[in-house]
Amino acid sequence: MKIGEILGKIDRRIVFGFMAIVVIVPFFFPLNVTGKVAPPSQQLFDAVEEIQPDSKPLLISIDFDPQSMPELYPMLKAILRHAFSRNVRVCMMALWVTGVGLGEAALNEVAPEYGKVHGKDYVYLGWKPGFAAVVLGMGKSIPETFPTDQYGTPLESIPMMRGVKNFRDIPYAISISAGDPGALTLWIPYVQSRFGQKLGTGMTAVSAADAYPYLQSGQLTGLLGGMKGAAEYEHLVAEAGYSEASKPATQAMDSQSMAHLAIILLIVLGNIGFILTKGRK
Amino acid sequence: MSFLLAVCFIFGIGPPEAVKACDRPNDAGKCILLSWKLSPDDAGLKSYDIVRTDAFGKDTVVGSVPSGIGSFTDESVRDNVRYTYRVVARQDSLRAESVASGIAVSRAQWFNKARVNVLVALVIFSFLVFYFIRHARAGRKLFIRRIAGLDAVEEAVGRATEMGRPILYVPGLAGISQISTIAALNILSEVAKKTAKYGTDLLVPNRDPIVYTVALEMVKEAYTEVGRPDMFKKENVFFVSDNQFAYAAAVDGMMVREKPATNFFMGMFWAESLILAETGAATGAVQIAGTDSVHQLPFFITACDHTLIGEELYAASAYLSRDPLLLGSLKGQDWGKVVILAVLVAGSILLVLSGIKGLSFLHVIYSFFNIS
Amino acid sequence: MMKQGIPRLLCLVAGIVMIVQFFIPHPISEKIFSESLRWVRIISAFALVLGVRSITVHHGTRIIRKSSGWGYSLVALVAMVVTAVIGLFGGVDPHATALLPTSIGGFSFHLQVLYANLMVPLGATMFSILAFYMASAAYRSFRARNKEATVLLVAAFIVMIGMVPIGSAIWPKLPDIAQWLLNVPSMAAKRGILFGIALGSVATSLKIILGIERGWLGGGK
């Protein structure tokens, strides 16, 4: 078989095997390539930096499910590490019922690293049905929308929630969002537009491109796009000395970099094969 | 009051001025908007307190804003009750109170004036659609450009018949309330008529139970219409799972086992689009896809033989059936796009011109197109 | 009349009411809207019963006829029944007591445990197939057959390299160019498609509301 035909018709099993190797090898031989931090990621980091410690809480909304975990869970943990290391209080909630466990897991993992206590340094409100009704209700009164936290404790008896009535008492809100309901379909039209809430978001790479117009218009202050955004935030948090924990997104970016290069190589080989066979014909 | 002013004058805090209170327009009531001119000593202030006086003279502090902010939204009012407001500048123990605002009464509106532009657009668009439907009813021929994906349907069904293999039709993963699902089901009806004519098996796995029941009825009706009710197999239209990836896994398994000659992917898709399309490509099937999900279009274009992009999916039922009413509405839709293009060009020109000194009044025209 | 007339009338009335509702901010209008959403959620829940019936009949028929692969149908039905029983009688809250105990010693088979240890890894596995399929699809179809395909190819290379850290290591300006490609030409094309989709949706909705498009009723004239 001529070289052109071989290159143009590589068996898909070889392609899959090659991709598997290229993705797995960086886990054992990390590249440690640090990319440039994109301005939207820097913006979100700066917005969390501006929040006063031991004061009004940062609101984080879990708007994703386990299927989007690889991209969004590392950014959630990085944001929590940033907040807790600066003694910024965190109020977490979930708009996706399948994300409730993820929020809890992240808090249970990160909070003990900084000696943070539930009720004093963070609170987990849990999930409520209703999507738009929930956030609109929070705009009027958070205690009325979430009378108790995820564990049944009345909000009025939770020390850090005293004096937190509605969005006016939230300096910054971040929606970690994988789709609908999320930042673009709920938080921007209902919360940012109506209540003027300062808002940031972390999204999957596929949907992040849709958020750029809102960044440009100022409706969003900060955007983490996919695994790359998560890696950039981990880098910013580590560089500022806030965390020495492992950086799963940064590790994964090595694999993603290699995977992209591998796909480019395959495309080039395919085109070489195409040109050679076309030339012969 | 004059004593207070004197105190303020001596200690140097100026009160806020020109407090205006009015009903928030275009809302469901129970809201009054306040604005005021900041105190001359705003830079050194701690906050502004907003004091509301109701019809009985009772004062209530309804909120507080930090210095630098000259507006407030009071959402704790009752409708049809007269209120006045005063704004109190605070600096430590010092206070400087404004003159009371005029009377404000909150009311619920029956029409959202900010959406007049949407109403105008809807009227214009509806007019265009009805005009061309009348045109079509009067027997006028309406030109529609070739859509390669839809022309390929007949050929694809024929191919499956020749090979003695079934056709797989995936009507998307969204519910019946999505327009793309309804468009997909309309195409299913046309495909089912063809498969009934040729005697080819048609497999329709569904992710949504309601879509399953509608698809079942549509396929059955299609077979009856063509005069082949005996060929209809109820077990070929079924519900699989409402979990996205469980559904994708099931359909992939079906493609690998049944080896359909033709795959149709029509409707709303998410991340599973490439999983379905690439598995189908691996089995050697001819694939025709159509979706309005812009994120998934690149995957379908890469992996499928023909792809209906965006509104081509909605045009499909008109294109395949050649029904005059449907063709007329398609024409109206196209002219609606012409109107939008004209508005875009005009709006861009107005935006640029309104930046010129003396022509800033033009912003009133282009701000009409803002949606709220 | 019963099969088509009444549904079309309901569709017409409901469609016009919801269009008018969009322009009326009054609380009565908002109540109609929120009530309609509640009805939709309740009806959707009932529809699940239809789905369960379909699965049972579909797989049951395959088992009875001993069609090829009927063993997998048996597994599917058993899994459905067992999960339903655990969910219904074992509850969804792992901390609350329920009718059915959901653990034996240290081994828990609570619904949340089943979800976290079965559904989540299976979903992640299916999702991860995308990486391999993207590679094979890109290899198969990204050929420079003509000028337009070549432009697409070059743009794809720039974006693929620019969006990973290695891109800025190769050339610091590459991520900016990649972002520009996504923000400007790609966004412009997307918006054009979205305009068409929006108009198509409005036209299709009008046709359905006015009864011009009747396919959704289940076919027939």
Image: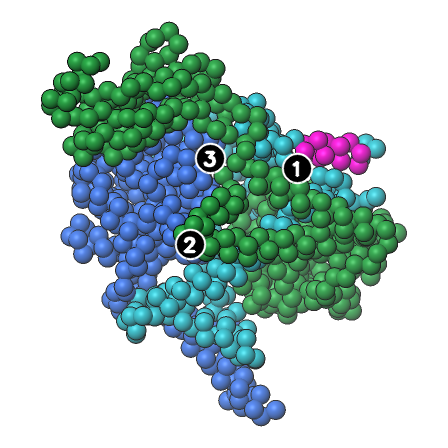
Chain colours: A blue, B green, C cyan
Dot 2 corresponds to which residue? B356
Q: Identify the residue shown where x is 80% and y is 34%.
A: C5
Q: Position of residue C38 (x, y in %)?
A: 56, 29
Q: Nearer the viewer, residue C218 or B8?
A: B8
- Tell me if residue A34 comes above or below residue A75 in the rendering: below
- Mark 1 belongs to which subunit? C
Left or right relative to B177: residue B56: left
Q: Which mark is residue C88?
A: none
Asked whether the beta carbons under mark 1 and mark 3 sit within 8 Å of each other, the answer is no
Q: Nearer the viewer, residue B226 or B146?
A: B146
Q: Which residues are magenta?
A: C4-16
Left or right relative to B144: residue C51: left
Is label 3 in a helix, a strand or a loop?
Answer: loop
Dot 1 corresponds to which residue? C50
- Label 1 vs label 3: CA separation? 26 Å
- Mark 2 belongs to which subunit? B
Dot 3 corresponds to which residue? A131
Any part of residue C9 in sight = yes
